[in-house]
Image (spheres, grey):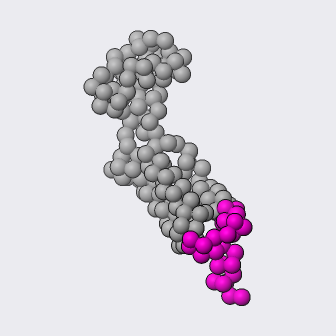
Amino acid sequence: MDAESLGVFLFGMKGDVSWWQMSLRGITVFIYGLLLVRFPGQRIFGKSSAFDIVLAVLVGSNLSRALTGNSPFIATLAATTVIVMIHWGVAHLAAHSRVLSWLAKGAVVHLVTDGQPDRRRMARHGITDGDLEEAMRQFGVERLDQVKTACLERNGKISVVPK
């Protein structure tokens, strides 16, 4: 039996996958996905930036197609690998380019400076007083006049530096 025939026997064909072939696909996709996500480094899903969320959606979508047999198995895994490698490459290039970093990951937005909130920036980024107050509580700050700076970070979280 050649490699292609073995692959068809073990993993089935598009749209024609038995229960045990889908189970074998599930095991393979799980191990593949785990290795693929760990290979580029811990940061790949370490933060929930838009850049990382897009990758998560694409990888999840592709791996589900490989699992259910809605797309050719090896081609789908190969395409998923390419997507992850592009993410890895852009992330590393962004570390050396301010413009690419801004395009891929966004920029920090200062929301409060010396206790004074910037309402225009807050509104532009959909940050309510309640969102700001929640972040302040998480950093142990009770009042705005106790805030040195508060920023909307690139990963969408609000950080607070007390006075």
Figure quadrant of residue 10:
bottom right
Picture residue at 62% right of the left edge, 55% below the top: 38
Picture residue at 27% right of the left edge, 25% below the top: 120
User: Is residue 40 depicted above or below 15 in this figure?
Assistant: above
Location of residue 23 in the rendering, given as x and y in whole percent from the top left corner:
70, 63
Picture residue at 66% right of the left edge, 84% below the top: 5
Residue 3 is a magenta residue = yes
| Stretch in magenta | 1-28
Q: Residue 63 vs residue 159: left or right?
A: right
Picture residue at 29% right of the left edge, 31% below the top: 124
User: Is residue 110 depicted above or below 143 in this figure?
Assistant: below
Location of residue 50 in the rendering, given as x and y in whole percent from the top left corner:
43, 45
Location of residue 46 in the rendering, given as x and y in whole percent from the top left corner:
56, 45
Figure quadrant of residue 13:
bottom right
Location of residue 97 in the rendering, given as x and y in whole percent from the top left corner:
37, 52
Q: Residue 14 vs residue 27: left or right?
A: left
Q: Magenta span: helix, strand or loop, mainly?
A: helix
Q: Residue 53 vs residue 115: left or right?
A: right
Residue 69 is a magenta residue = no
Q: Could you say which is closer to the camera, residue 58 or residue 97?
A: 58
**Can the viewer see residue 35 in this picture?**
no
User: Is residue 115 depicted above or below 122 in this figure?
Assistant: above
